[in-house]
Amino acid sequence: MSPLTGIKVVDLSKVLAGPLCGQYLGDLGADVIKIEPPGQGDDTRGWTPLRGGESASFLAVNHNKRSVALDLKSPSGKRAFFRILEDADVVIQGFGAGTAERLGVDYESVKKHVPDIIYCEISGYGREGPLGNEPGYDVMLQAFSGMIDSIGQPEGERARVSFSPVDLGTGMHAVSGILAALLERQRSGCGAFVEVSLLDTAMGYMGYMAHNYWASGRVPRRMGTAHPSLCPYQVFETKDGSIMLGVGNDRLWKKFCECADLLDYADNPRFATNAARVKNFQETCELVTHRLRERSSETWLVQLRAAGVPVSAIQSLPEALNHEQVQARNIVVRSQHPTLGEVEHIAYPVSFNKLPRDVKRHPPLLGEHTREVLAQAGYSPDEIAGLLNEGAAAQY
């Protein structure tokens, strides 16, 4: 199932947020053309680690695309861009403040050529306000939003969320915004300017914590793996390791007490309700810790799962990737890369009609499809050769 078949996306973005958006649109069947500057291409092409000269970070967010190396600063390169754009449906752009305008590829300029275009701009802080011109970096928005201040061990160092959730979440919001705009265009015939920012995403992540703060007046504090509103709901040590325990309600507390031979505490007023357990947080955690240390992690995993109590092993990434549940869900898919051979990818996190997910195009080499895309835009072989010779376009 490829619901976006026939939709053409021109992707001017780089790094993570915009490229992930483009990749997901490609996963849904869109023809995604990634425009990159000749020479170095997307910044992430130079990020380590490298595999056979190709960046792992680039491979992660750029499959199901074609790459065109085009110099938008040159007049002929810009003309080529607008030729490619003539039958496009969507543009994704993530330049710094003022850059799109200087290059002449901002929304107003593009709209003159394609009046019903869906134009998605990705920025750090949005374009309004005192920080509207600031560049956007995931870790800066983690810091700005209060995220980093709320993460880490009690009385310990603050911690950054390791996988760049603000960048990736912004890409996901861009996808939903573009899909909504495509539906609106189908209804009204009008294009749209879709705006997402790392700031909006970061503050969106903090939404329920903001409501907790507004309701209680308490600033979120660092709690390690624990939860401010649920208990016991964190990592606990066992006889030979650690597990993640999630007693999310009073019914689960009773099940846990039955499994852990703690029935005397199931209806004890100090522990019987979640509110009581949160109030007596330290005492609850000490009670659970003492009992969990009596058995091995594997024993607890088997017994608690059998009892219907949420529990998980603390796995490494390789352990998760190789787990039979991940394999059963077909989450890891593969493509054939022209220089690397078989490359593994994380699939689009949505499946349709129980059909297997796949990757139709490998992450492209820089400018791999320049000639092909220019020819489709109406350029003759001689005209393409001229663009390549003058450096306005490149194919490597």
Image (cartoon, rainbow, N blue to C red):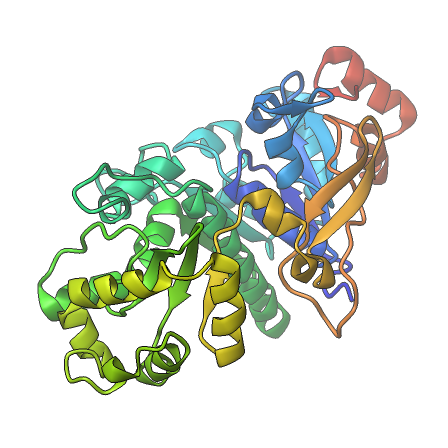
Does residue 228 show up?
no
Where is residue 129 shown, x and y percent of the image? 23, 44
Decide if residue 145 is on the left or right side of residue 198: left
Q: Is residue 193 shown above or below 71? A: below
Decide if residue 35 is on the left or right side of residue 173: right
Asked whether 228 or 264 is in front, the reply is 264
Q: Could you tell me which quadrant the N terminus lies in? A: bottom right
Asked whether 288 or 28 is in front, the reply is 288
Residue at the left extreme of this rendering: 217
Q: Quadrant of residue 39?
A: top right
Residue at the front extreme of this rendering: 294
Q: Quadrant of residue 385?
A: top right
Q: Is residue 55 shown above or below 108? A: above
The number of callouts visible is 0
Where is residue 288 shown, x and y percent of the image? 29, 66
**Which residue is depicted at the point 60% across and 24% down?**
49
Where is residue 265 shown, x and y percent of the image? 24, 80
Where is residue 295 shown, x and y percent of the image? 43, 61
Asked whether 15 or 292 is in front, the reply is 292
Asked whether 159 or 113 is in front, the reply is 159
Q: Is residue 144 shown above or below 200? A: above
Does residue 12 show up?
yes
Decide if residue 19 is on the left or right side of residue 247: right
**Which residue is depicted at the point 54% across and 50% down?**
119
Q: Could you tell me which quadrant the C terminus lies in? A: top right
